Amino acid sequence: MSTLSALAHVQAMESMQAVPVTEFRHRHLSARPLVIIPLAMAGEAGAPLAAMVGSAKRNGTLLVVAQPRNRDQRFAFAAGLGQIVMDYIDSFRQDRRGEGERSRYTDAPQILVPNPGGVKALADLGRMCRFRSTSGLYAVPDVVPEFGMWLTFLVERAEQTGTSMLLPVTDMLAEHWATGQSTLEDQNLASLMAWIAPPSGLSVEQAMADAENPDVCPSAGPSTSPDFDNRDLAPAIRKFDTAHKLGDPHALSAAETVLRELIAGQIQPTWRMVWQAISLLRSVPEAPRSAKRFEGDCKAFTDYSDYRDSGGLPQRKRDTAIGAARRLGFLERALAEFESDMAFDDRFVLADRRSAGEAFTGTVVEAEPGRTVTTDKNRRVPRPRVTVRTEDPVRLAADTKLISPSMLAGHKAMIVSVLPDGGTTRVTVEITGGMGRSRVPKQGTVPEPGQYVAYLPDPGWRPAPQFPASDAAPWTHSAADEVGTDSAVPKDAAAEEWGNEE
């Protein structure tokens, strides 16, 4: 945590009110997001209990698994939820523009869950569904494996920083507002909303006390409160099981009604709170560069849609060593690009990076606008140099490539030297791009003495890591039966990990 971030949290604690730490919302927010609130039994990993899903506050659909340990009921639930989600996804596969490699859908789906635990619950559900067979032993409805593959795609996409196709609402809120509580406590949606927008008539302290009381603010999931499980849920499930064994349709219907009402009482407060959070986030202006990042989401959505239309296989259970390393390198680069975009768009974020020595601003004190150099191809090109005096701590090394939010688009530079100068620092930079094609830089493309400028590292300066081919992995990083194979479907794809428990 940087100095400014820590200061914002302290300020929030002293004022007992959330403090904005960004000027913009750096995530795209769809005009028609699909909200999913998954619930699972506490202590029953991979056993879905319920979900509320919908694309508008007033049209939420509640799906309940009366007996989460029953395989048939679990996959009936997955089929019901999968049909809603696939209908939503398919609604974005209508408007497509461009030709050839440039052809893509103009919009992409966006699924919002209450917290990171909701993403994990969807990941578990996707893993449970995507390898299932639609025929033979343990057959499931046709929509189940398709739903599982799409969920897995969305979860993998969510791991890439800056994407907007699957997002936890708590992360979006905490990205814009600092509270007086810890990062872990910020994952509690009710507690976070208590700091940002406490209910009318309540102070932040009173709203926080209610947020910590599961009887007032039920858990936002994915696991229910153990007290609720022991006191209410377990007896209701036992009542349902008894009615099911007796074969009494009236008792079974009554037990199902009681169970649905119990779960509705647990999930509806979170449903209302998520939509309240969405309204708050809509009030924050969207950052300029978020539209460009969302174009990447549209491209990924188009590519995966085409892959599924061509009969593509489910995602692998586990990445190969080289595949995992390649993906890690890609995720690291995406993180660097997102952090750079945030600082480029947002002066609050830029100030935060300046306090950590990862960016700097200052006044130009010297300039060589007419400087040129000879390239390896014996061409003379402009390479002006300017010296910036800054009071910021600078922890950037020579040869670091830079971009500038204060200069014209396309401006590129590189650090030549960083020298202390009393209580300030003199940073000499060489302009390398954005000056036009002539030998004389265009007006306004080179900072002038007395001009105030800002610089931060260009995320593209890092060279792309090179990895060996998949068949060249050392024996220590490959399994003998997997070398040279790309099959994504395990041999026991249709096998059930655990069956019914009567």
Image: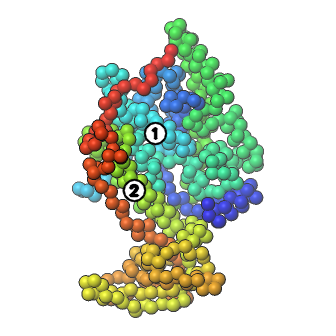
Disc 2: CA contacts within 10 A as few (<14), some (14-19) or many (>=20): some
**Residue 317, placed above or below residue 138:** below
Residue in view at x 65 percent, y 47 percent: 185
Residue under the image location 35 percent in, 35 percent down: 146
Q: How many marks?
A: 2
- Pick the residue in front: 95 or 414: 414
**Amino acid tagged 1:** Ala
Residue 68 position in % (x across, y down) = 51, 24
Tell me the amino acid under the disc marked 2. Phe
Provide the residue designation for mark 2.
330
Q: Which mark is residue 32?
A: none
Asked if residue 427 is positioned above or below residue 348 in the image, the reply reads below
Residue at left 52%, top 9%?
Answer: 245
At mark 2, the secondary structure is helix
In which quadrant of the rendered image does the N terminus lie? bottom right
Residue for badge 1: 123
Instruction: Give coordinates of residue 145: x percent, y percent.
Output: 36, 33
Res 175 quadrant in image: bottom right
Residue closest to the eye, 252 or 187: 187
Q: Position of residue 468 (x, y in %)?
A: 30, 55
The answer to whether residue 54 shows anywhere in this view is no
Image quarter for residue 2?
bottom right
